[in-house]
Image: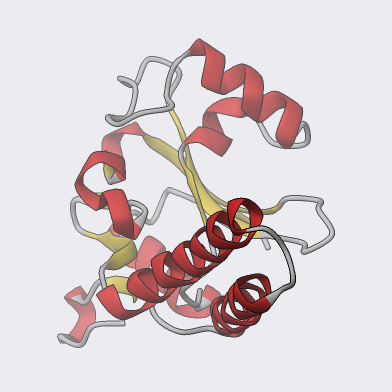
Amino acid sequence: MTSGGTSSAYEARYGWDRRTSLFVVMAAVLSTFVAVADATPFLRWPGAVLFGGAGLLMAYGAMSRKVAFRVDGTGVLLGGYPARYSATTAHAPWQDITAVVLWQQHTAAGLRWVGVARRPDAARLPGPGQGDRAQAVMRAMAPEVPADVALASRAVTGWRLDHAALTAAVHRFAPDVPVVGG
């Protein structure tokens, strides 16, 4: 959370968390294993590059310290994915937001998400993956969450969510907007 008295925003930045650290370590181990494995170069090097590249991409995201999620007087910033930050960042103004939604995708890893529910007549958020096809995919991946909410959400991975600070900021800037889920 940034400082600045009662007008301070809630902001979470990408960094190292347990999931990111584990992913980077596992990618390094798998990359090394594949590189030294007794296999043909046709299998060895693509595997090493794939695992190594994935680990480097995750490490880059953690070290970027870009804004992952922000609540301020203008609304909610859904930070983009670090490798394509500008193209995947979206801002939802308070006049379009009906709720801030915390939800969990039911997977083996139990991935947590935070997003916004918006007025039905609100313009689509900018960026890729906001069309009808994306909504169909999200209905299949997270059927318990409305597709428009899922598309206006960010996974809480590579950064930490402070539920109490988030709730306080939402109530400070938009007292009529509830924070639902948990």
* Residue 14 visible to an observer of this rendering: no
Q: Residue at x 33, y 54 (%)?
A: 174
Q: Is residue 76 above or below residue 167?
A: above
Residue 60 percent across, percent down from the top left: 33, 72
Of residues 27 and 149, which is closer to you in this image? 27
Q: Residue at x 31, y 72 (%)?
A: 11
Residue 133 percent across, percent down from the top left: 54, 14
User: Could you say which quadrant of the image residue 119 lies in?
Assistant: top left
Residue 76 percent across, percent down from the top left: 31, 51
Q: Is residue 28 left or right of residue 168?
A: right
Q: Is residue 62 above or below residue 123?
A: below
Of residues 92 and 168, which is closer to you in this image? 92
Residue 73 percent across, percent down from the top left: 19, 58
If the image is split into quadrants, where does the C terminus sit?
bottom right
Q: Residue at x 61, y 27 (%)?
A: 147
User: Could you say which quadrant of the image residue 96 lies in?
Assistant: top left
User: Could you say which quadrant of the image residue 83 lies in?
Assistant: bottom left
Q: Residue at x 31, y 63 (%)?
A: 70
Q: Is residue 70 left or right of residue 103?
A: left
If the image is split into quadrants, where does the N terminus sit?
bottom left
Of residues 90 and 121, which is closer to you in this image? 90
